[in-house]
C-alpha cells in the first residue's frame, strides 16, 4: 500500500484493514498509518485462519461431483479414487479462476474418460463460497475489535482506561467500521469479485483497493521486501523475548517469561473475560524463590535490547525473587511487574517497535503516573482468586 501511495506522491493517513486470502491461509491485519515523508506504520492487530482458497476448491469440487451425478455419472464408481479426486480439484481450481472473469464456465473433465461437460455459474461459486465468507467476516470484526484493545478509552469522569472486552463485544459493525479508512485486498482469492463485494460492503465509507502495483498474491512479499519507504514499523505485540536471568553457582541461568510474537490472549478469552492480558505469576513464574534476578529484553537475533525507563537507560530491571511474582502485559502496552518483596512497577509502551539494527535497539518504557491508576483496583488485579468475570 505504501508503494502505491508513495509512487503517486500521496500520503495515506488513517486506519487500514488488510484482507489477505491466499490458497492456504486467510490473514487479516489492522494497521494505523501516520503520513509524511517517512510514514510510521503501526500494526494494531493480526488474525489468521486456514480457511482460504483450498477450502473453496473442495466446496466447488463437491458441486461438480453433484453435477455429474445429476447427469448419471458417479465419480465414486471410477477406479483410482485418489487420482480422480486430484483431477476433480484441478478442475475446481480452474473453474474458480475462470469465474473471476466470466459469468459461466463449462467444466471439461480431462483425463477422466468420457464424462459430460458440466456448466458452472458464478452464482453457484458464490453460494459455495458464502459459508466461508461468513466466517471470514467474523474474523474481520475480531481483528477490528482486537485493534481497539491497543487503544485507551475515556471514562465518564475523563480518566483514560483500557477498552474492555465487554464493551467491544457490545459494539456493532456500524460503530466498528467507522474508523477504517482504507481496505486492501491481497492474495490470489481477492481476484474473486465476491470477495471484494462482501468485504467492501462491511466498510461503506472506506476506500477499497485491490491494486498495489504488483499482483495481489505478491503484495505482501513486496511490502516485506521494501523497508526503505517508511521510517518506523510498530507491532501490536512484542517482537522480542522477555527473559528472566539469575546467577546460579558459577554460571548464569535464563528462562523466557514471554516469547516473541506470542498472542496476549486466546480467542475464547475475548468472548468471556472482562480484561485481557498475558500473565506469568506465582507458581507459573520461572526462576528461584529467593535471591535476585534481572528481567531483560532479547531480540529474535539473540542480541539484548537496551531499555529506557522514564528517560534513563538500563540493561535490565532488577527483581527480588519470592513466592508472589507477577509479570502481566496488557494489549495497550501496559506492563505490571511485581517482585517477591511486594514492590510493583507499572510501565507503558506506546507501541511495540520492530527491533531492527542499531536504530531500533532500544525499548522505551514510561512509568504509569499515579493519577492514571485511580479506579484500577490494583489489589483486585493482583490476587490469584480474582475471577475473570462477574
Image (cartoon, rainbow, N blue to C red):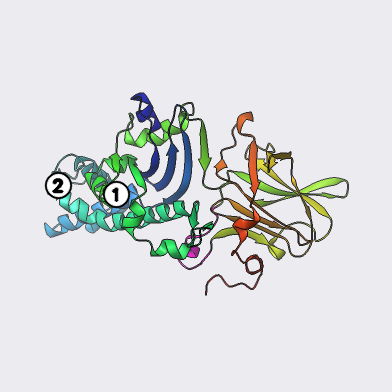
> Which residue is depicted at the point 47% across and 37% down?
41
Between 345 and 371, the one nearer to me in the picture: 371
Residue 90: x and y in percent read 27, 44
Region of the chain picked out in magenta, as a range: 263-275
- Cα separation, mark 1 vs mark 2, equals 47 Å
> Which residue is depicted at the point 30% across and 38% down?
209
Q: Quadrant of residue 99?
A: top left
What's the mark number on residue 346? none
204 horizontally vs 302: left or right: left
Decide whether residue 344 is among the magenta residues.
no
Residue hosting label 1: 203
Which corner quadrant holds the N terminus? top left
Q: Nearer the viewer, mark 1 or mark 2?
A: 1
Residue 329: x and y in percent read 60, 55
118 horizontally vs 222: left or right: left
Residue 386: x and y in percent read 61, 72
Q: Secondary structure at mark 1?
A: loop
Q: Are marks 1 and 2 in contact (CB under 8 Å)?
A: no
Q: Magenta span: helix, strand or loop, mainly?
A: loop
The first of marks 1 and 2 along the sequence is: 2
Residue hosting label 2: 114
How crowded pointer 2 is (Cα within 10 Å; few <14, some 14-19, many 20+) is rated as few
Amino acid at each position: 500500500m505504501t508503494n502505491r501511495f508513495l509512487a503517486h506522491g500521496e500520503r495515506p493517513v488513517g486506519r487500514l484493514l488488510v484482507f489477505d486470502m491466499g490458497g492456504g491461509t486467510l490473514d487479516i491485519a489492522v494497521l494505523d498509518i501516520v503520513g509524511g515523508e517517512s510514514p510510521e506504520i503501526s500494526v494494531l492487530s493480526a488474525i489468521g485462519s486456514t480457511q482460504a482458497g483450498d477450502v473453496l476448491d473442495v466446496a466447488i469440487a463437491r458441486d461438480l461431483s453433484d453435477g455429474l451425478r445429476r447427469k448419471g455419472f458417479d465419480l465414486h464408481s471410477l477406479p483410482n479414487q485418489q487420482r480422480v479426486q486430484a483431477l476433480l480439484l484441478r478442475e475446481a481450481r480452474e473453474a474458480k479462476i475462470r469465474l473471476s472473469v466470466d459469468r459461466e464456465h463449462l467444466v471439461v473433465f480431462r483425463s477422466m474418460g468420457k464424462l459430460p461437460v458440466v456448466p458452472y455459474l458464478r452464482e453457484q461459486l458464490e453460494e459455495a463460497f458464502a459459508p466461508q465468507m461468513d466466517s471470514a467476516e467474523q474474523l474481520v470484526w475480531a481483528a477490528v475489535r482486537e485493534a481497539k484493545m491497543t487503544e485507551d478509552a475515556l471514562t465518564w469522569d475523563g480518566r483514560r482506561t483500557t477498552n474492555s472486552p465487554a464493551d467491544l463485544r457490545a459494539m456493532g459493525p456500524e460503530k466498528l467500521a467507522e474508523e477504517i479508512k482504507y481496505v486492501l485486498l491481497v492474495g490470489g482469492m481477492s481476484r474473486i469479485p465476491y470477495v471484494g463485494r462482501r468485504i467492501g460492503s462491511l466498510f461503506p465509507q472506506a476506500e477499497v483497493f485491490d491494486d498495489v502495483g504488483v499482483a495481489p498474491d505478491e503484495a505482501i512479499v513486496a511490502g516485506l521486501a521494501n523497508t526503505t519507504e517508511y521510517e518506523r514499523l510498530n507491532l501490536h505485540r512484542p517482537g522480542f523475548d522477555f527473559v528472566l536471568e539469575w546467577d546460579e553457582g558459577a554460571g548464569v541461568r535464563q528462562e523466557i517469561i514471554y516469547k516473541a510474537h506470542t498472542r496476549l490472549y486466546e480467542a475464547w478469552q475475548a468472548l468471556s473475560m472482562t480484561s485481557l492480558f498475558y500473565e506469568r505469576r506465582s507458581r507459573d513464574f520461572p526462576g528461584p524463590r529467593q535471591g535476585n534476578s534481572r528481567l531483560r529484553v532479547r531480540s529474535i537475533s539473540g542480541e539484548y535490547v537496551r531499555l529506557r525507563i522514564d528517560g534513563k537507560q538500563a540493561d535490565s530491571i532488577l527483581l527480588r525473587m519470592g513466592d508472589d511474582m507477577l509479570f502481566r502485559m496488557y494489549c495497550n502496552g501496559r506492563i505490571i511487574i511485581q517482585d517477591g518483596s511486594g514492590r510493583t512497577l507499572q510501565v507503558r509502551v506506546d507501541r511495540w517497535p520492530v527491533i531492527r539494527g542499531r536504530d531500533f535497539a532500544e525499548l522505551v518504557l514510561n512509568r504509569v503516573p499515579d493519577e492514571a491508576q485511580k479506579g484500577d483496583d490494583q489489589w483486585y488485579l493482583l490476587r490469584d482468586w480474582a475471577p475473570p468475570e462477574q
